[in-house]
Amino acid sequence: MKLMHCHELCKPVTILILVNLALAFVNLLLKMVLNEGMDYMSIVTYRQAISFIFMAPIAWFYERKHKLEAHIICLLFLSALVGVTIPQYLFLLGLQYTSATFSCAFLNMVPVFTFIMSLPFGIEKVNMKSKSGKAKILGTIVCIGGVLILALYKGISINSSQSQHIANTYTSAPPKLGKWIIGSILLTAGCIMWSSWFVIQAKISKKYPCQYSSTAILSLFAAIQSAILTLVIKRNNASWILKGKLEILCVIYAGMVGSGLCYVAMSWCVKQRGPVFTAAFTPLLQIFVAVLDFTILKEEIYLGSIAGSVLVIVGMYVLLLGKSMEEEQCVIKDTQANQDVECQ
């Protein structure tokens, strides 16, 4: 039974590892073009538009026979707003105020926020008397403590001496404390929004199990929403012009891979294993980004980021341990129930 369980886990685990590695490269490219002065809202619009152009033919080829109902379209519009348009806007804005590694550290909050949001909808349940319930609550508290450290304590730079000796074209000046706090608030709000996407996607996947079509429609809505938001906030037409090969490469890769294939993969994992399991792999993104950030961008890594991230990751895996214990208890109960039926 355990061997079969491990085999079932192998595919979604591998997919989620590759997804987070791909998103780490998206993060790296975004930080590079933002440091060169590219407008963050035009990035979101181009990214989603390219994702729609890329995913639409695939969706038509594989899933054209499936009917799309009006309430699914409404859910996809809401999913695009709270899961793509607003979070990506807040994330890119927060990225400008902080650093790539720090912004990805905040993504570690997504599993906890997803777990908390799943409770009212009955997707997740907590029994305070059981060990699994206590582990979930403890993991949530530890994670929130790590988030507070991330937001309120910056600490000393771990690699400042190396950063001073190595010059890099894409290195930006270290953010001031005021900007650091503003960036923290923006990133937290973005994480709350993105967490709600996992919960909404769990509902969509049950009623409309077409990952390619839902991602294509999601991208179309997100592109329209982002374009309107850009026109309202910034009326400068020059911000739409892509300058240089790096900006073109960034929006194409971020659109096709980051917003296209990665969202398809995450939607499939939400359908197979649930929203909390899928969100639980987001800390891998920070690890991948930290390696790329340190080796390529040469940005400074702060003590507060490391301490807060460690607490968040520990809390998240305590929460995941509680969920695993709960699943084992459910399997044991189902096995006993089946045995009782056979005996009768």
Image (cartoon, grey):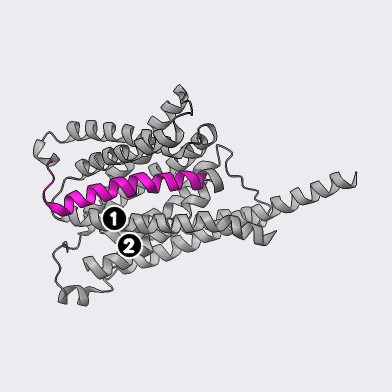
Q: Secondary structure at mark 2?
A: helix
129 vs 166, left or right, is right
Which quarter of the image is occupied by the C terminus?
A: top right
Give the x, y percent position of residue 241.
12, 42
- Mark linked to residue 206: none
The stretch drawn in magenta includes residue 252? yes
Task: Work out whether residue 7 can be spotted.
Answer: yes
- Residue at 16% across, 62% down: 170
Q: Which residues are magenta?
A: 241-270
Residue linked to disc 1: 27
Instruction: Work out whether residue 303 or residue 54 is closer to the camera in this orientation and state it.
Output: 54
* Tag 2: amino acid: Val
* Tag 1: amino acid: Asn
332 vs 272, left or right, is right
Say which quarter of the image contains residue 286: bottom left
Give the x, y percent position of residue 64.
44, 30
The stretch drawn in magenta includes residue 89? no
Give the x, y percent position of residue 229.
23, 33
Give the x, y percent position of residue 332.
74, 53
Instruction: Work out whether residue 120 or residue 234 is closer to the camera in this orientation and state it.
Output: 234
Q: How many marks?
A: 2
Residue linked to disc 2: 289
Q: Report the Cα–Cα distance between label 2 and label 1.
A: 7 Å
- Residue at 51% across, 54% down: 12
Q: Secondary structure at mark 1?
A: helix
Say which quarter of the image contains residue 296: bottom left
Q: Residue furthest right?
A: 344
- Residue at 61% across, 56% down: 324
The crowd level at tag 1 (other Cα within 10 Å; few <14, some 14-19, many 20+) is: many
Q: Are marks 2 and 1 in contact (CB under 8 Å)?
A: yes
Of pointers 2 and 1, the one earlier in the residue sequence: 1
- Residue at 39% across, 67% down: 307
